[in-house]
Image (cartoon, rainbow, N blue to C red):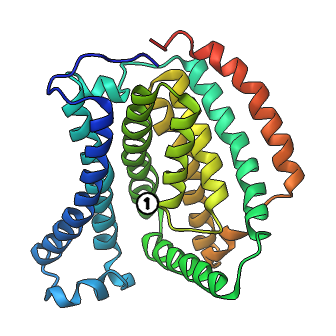
């Protein structure tokens, strides 16, 4: 990555990182308020019924809208504002470059595909971590809450619903989260410290933690590290958005298949692999990343 010395507002990268975190917190409040406003505008009734509406399958359209608004306010808007305060060209700073080589894109997608096996093995390892009874109950409650949200968001009865789900559950999260975590947080941290691996690891820990899932923590950590490396070697936000989208889209297609077969989506949690698969996948990733770096040399600046 190249360092950017100039700043239009006199705010350096360290300050920009601090502002980003503050804006993220403010975005949580703002997103919730905007969702409530959208609820009222759509004729949703009293605000006291807002939380109940978010748990009602009949309101799947509004639930998707509310989640998209919230994600935009927590991730996308804070990232744009924080980088605008640091750089004269915030979109270029984030990595919205005009193009990316097809060979680099294909290498990135291959690496993401291999990461699925590593993540599945880490999910198996994650379940082997001993927990006290109270922590186990808490972790299971987080998973149950996540699955309830997935159940509501993923109600699909045909191709039209599938396309909407791909937009709301795959593309929007990929774009919003990658702009925040890779294009802004990791980018600012790297420019502030000059430490690529430190910035990737801290970003990945935050990325995994913010999903509030103990049993999916190691899987998301591995996914984020790979995405962080893809971004570090290309400086292209398109690379990681596409890779993240493909990962999300696979999950959406799996849910669609289960829905069409009348099966519970809880079966998604069974996508776990033996630990030795993960060891092979990790070796393959380390080996193939050397070729990816060569392919990405033409984009880095």
Q: Badge 1 is on which residue?
A: 165
Residue 157 position, x and y percent, is: 47, 71
Furthest residue toward right = 276
The residue located at (28%, 65%) in the rendering is 65
Which of these two is toward me, 55 or 3? 3
* Numbered-mark total: 1
Q: Can you tell which quarter of the image residue 179 is in?
A: top left
Which of these two is toward me, 212 or 49? 212
* SS category of the residue bearing label 1: helix
The residue located at (17%, 26%) in the rendering is 10
Which of these two is toward me, 151 or 146? 146
Quarter that holds the C terminus: top left
The residue located at (75%, 33%) in the rendering is 285
Residue 300 position, x and y percent, is: 49, 14
Which of these two is toward me, 248 or 204? 204
Q: Is residue 69 left or right of residue 289?
A: left
The residue located at (32%, 80%) in the rendering is 54
Furthest residue toward left = 41
Q: Against 36, is 168 above or below? A: above
Q: Is residue 235 left or right of residue 128?
A: left
Within 10 Å of disc 1 (Cα), the crowding (few <14, some 14-19, many 20+) is many
Residue 67 position, x and y percent, is: 33, 65
Q: Against 122, is 194 above or below? A: above
Residue 167 position, x and y percent, is: 39, 53
């Amino acid at each position: 990555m190249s360092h950017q010395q100039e700043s239009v507002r006199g705010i350096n990268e360290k300050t920009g990182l601090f502002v980003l975190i503050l804006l993220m917190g403010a975005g949580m409040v703002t997103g919730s308020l905007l969702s409530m406003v959208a609820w009222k505008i759509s004729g949703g009734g009293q605000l006291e019924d807002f939380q109940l509406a978010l748990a009602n399958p009949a309101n799947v359209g509004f639930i998707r809208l509310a989640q998209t608004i919230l994600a935009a306010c927590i991730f996308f808007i804070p990232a744009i504002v924080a980088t605008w305060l640091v750089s004269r060209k915030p979109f270029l700073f984030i990595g919205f470059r005009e193009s990316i080589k097809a060979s680099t894109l294909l290498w990135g997608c291959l690496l993401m595909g291999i990461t699925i096996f590593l993540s599945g093995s880490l999910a198996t390892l994650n379940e082997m971590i001993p927990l006290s009874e109270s922590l186990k109950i808490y972790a299971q409650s987080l998973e149950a809450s996540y699955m309830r949200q997935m159940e509501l968001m993923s109600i699909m009865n045909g191709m039209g619903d599938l396309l909407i789900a791909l937009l709301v559950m795959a593309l929007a999260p990929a774009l919003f989260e990658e702009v925040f975590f890779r294009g802004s947080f990791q980018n600012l941290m790297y420019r502030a410290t000059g430490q690529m691996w430190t910035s990737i690891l801290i970003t990945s820990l935050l990325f995994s933690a913010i999903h509030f899932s103990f049993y999916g923590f190691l899987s998301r950590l591995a996914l984020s590290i790979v995405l962080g490396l893809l971004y570090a070697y290309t400086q292209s936000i398109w690379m990681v958005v596409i890779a993240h989208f493909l990962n999300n889209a696979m999950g959406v297609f799996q849910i669609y298949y289960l829905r069409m077969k009348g099966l519970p989506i809880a079966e998604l949690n069974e996508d776990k692999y033996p630990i030795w698969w993960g060891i092979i996948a990790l070796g393959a990733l380390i080996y193939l990343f050397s070729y990816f770096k060569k392919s990405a040399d033409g984009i880095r600046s």
